[in-house]
């Protein structure tokens, strides 16, 4: 509980649990959702109440949050730090902080479960890092694809010191028709973790892209040897495992895959009889006539 010196107090109702709080404590954090709500309440004019309580003069906030989780978040307003209780998972606390616009970082949160805590911090760091990779490294390759009229791209991430040396006469067979390459050891290390690839996929989805695939695949770097069979050369290439990003921005995918093979009859101006012949119905032959014709042929 928190009471103001002037006796002003508000009751916050979360999961049928009442929290008596000094509104000044909430207003002191104006960047949070509760801080904004009660800043508006304090600045109301002409009796207009924008943040309305219920019939018991209680403010129902944080719908869907547990009382234990909300109690931990209130600690941030009082001491600037939250302690995650054992009954609340780190992911639940993180989602609650996102909803209430409360910062979730190493300065504001204390957790006994370090693995879960560091996992959440890494997810946020991965989101910010991949957003930078997307703008600086991946998006320019997408722009190159658009200049050729393509509506999807397949990008392979090589190391900064990878050397690609293909035989001009016998290049390797590639699985993708338009594979693009970027050299970035930093991005390669980022994609090494499956969790980072999951975060990257979510970011690409939020940016409106489709058919998103991220993973590892073999990429040919240089030829190892040449085999000759029946006067035909076969080049053996060295392959390295490297991450790739595949995505599409095609809007009308269904139309691109539909091919109309219907050929309408075009009337000929030079020979009208062709058009009339094409439109004339096929004459019907009776079964008796057909049997008689076959019998005469056999004789």
Image: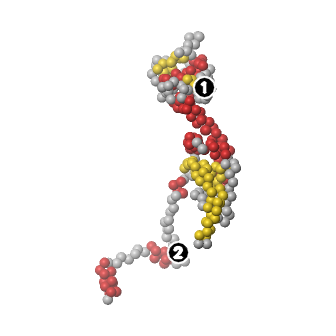
Q: Which residue is mark 1?
A: 108
Which quadrant would residue 114 be assigned to in this image? top right
Q: Which residue is located at x 49 percent, y 70 percent?
A: 265
Which residue is painted at 46% across and 74% down in the image?
Answer: 278
Q: Quadrant of residue 269?
A: bottom right
Residue 41 falls left or right of residue 288: right
* Residue 45 figure quarter: top right
Farthest-out residue, left: 288
- Is 106 situated above or below 221? above
Percent x, y for residue 225? 64, 62
* Secondary structure under the numbered disc 2 in the rendered image: loop
Q: Which mark is residue 284?
A: none
Give the labeled residue for mark 2. 268
Residue 88 place in picture, x, y as percent = 50, 27
- Neighbor class of circle 2 (other Cα within 10 Å; few <14, some 14-19, many 20+) is few
Judge whether residue 233 can be spotted in this image: yes
At mark 1, the secondary structure is loop
In the image, 15: left or right of 216? left
Q: Position of residue 254 (x, y in %)?
A: 51, 55
Residue 40 appears in the rendering: no
Outermost bottom residue: 299
Q: Which one is nearer the viewer's eye here, 292 or 141?
A: 141
* Residue 20, horizontal then vertical, whole percent: 52, 16
């Amino acid at each position: 509980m928190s009471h103001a010196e002037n006796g002003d107090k508000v009751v916050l109702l979360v999961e049928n649990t009442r929290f008596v709080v000094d509104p000044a404590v909430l207003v002191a954090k104006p960047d949070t959702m509760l801080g904004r709500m009660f800043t508006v309440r304090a600045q109301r004019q002409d009796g207009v109440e924008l943040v309305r309580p219920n019939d018991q003069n209680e403010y129902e906030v944080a719908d869907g949050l547990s009382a234990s989780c909300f109690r931990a978040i209130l600690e941030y307003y009082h001491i600037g730090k939250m302690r995650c209780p054992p009954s609340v998972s780190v992911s639940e606390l993180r989602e609650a902080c996102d909803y209430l616009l409360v910062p979730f970082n190493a300065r504001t949160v204390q957790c006994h479960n370090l693995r879960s805590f560091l996992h959440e911090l890494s997810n946020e760091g991965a989101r910010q890092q991949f957003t930078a990779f997307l703008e600086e490294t991946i998006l320019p390759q997408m722009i190159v694809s658009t200049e050729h009229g393509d509506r999807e791209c397949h990008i392979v991430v090589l190391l900064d010191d990878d050397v690609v040396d293909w035989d001009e006469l016998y290049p390797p067979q590639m699985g993708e028709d338009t594979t693009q390459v970027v050299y970035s050891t930093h991005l390669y290390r980022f994609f090494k973790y499956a969790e980072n690839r999951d975060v990257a996929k979510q970011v690409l989805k939020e940016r409106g892209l489709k058919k998103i695939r991220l993973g590892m695949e073999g990429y040919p770097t240089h030829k190892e040897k040449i085999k000759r069979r029946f006067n035909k050369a076969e080049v053996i290439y060295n392959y390295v495992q490297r991450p790739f990003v595949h995505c599409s921005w095609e809007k009308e995918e269904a139309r691109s895959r539909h091919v109309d093979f219907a050929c309408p009859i075009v009337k000929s101006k030079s020979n009208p009889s062709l058009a009339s012949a094409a439109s004339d119905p096929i004459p019907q032959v009776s079964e008796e006539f057909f049997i008689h014709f076959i019998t005469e042929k056999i004789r």
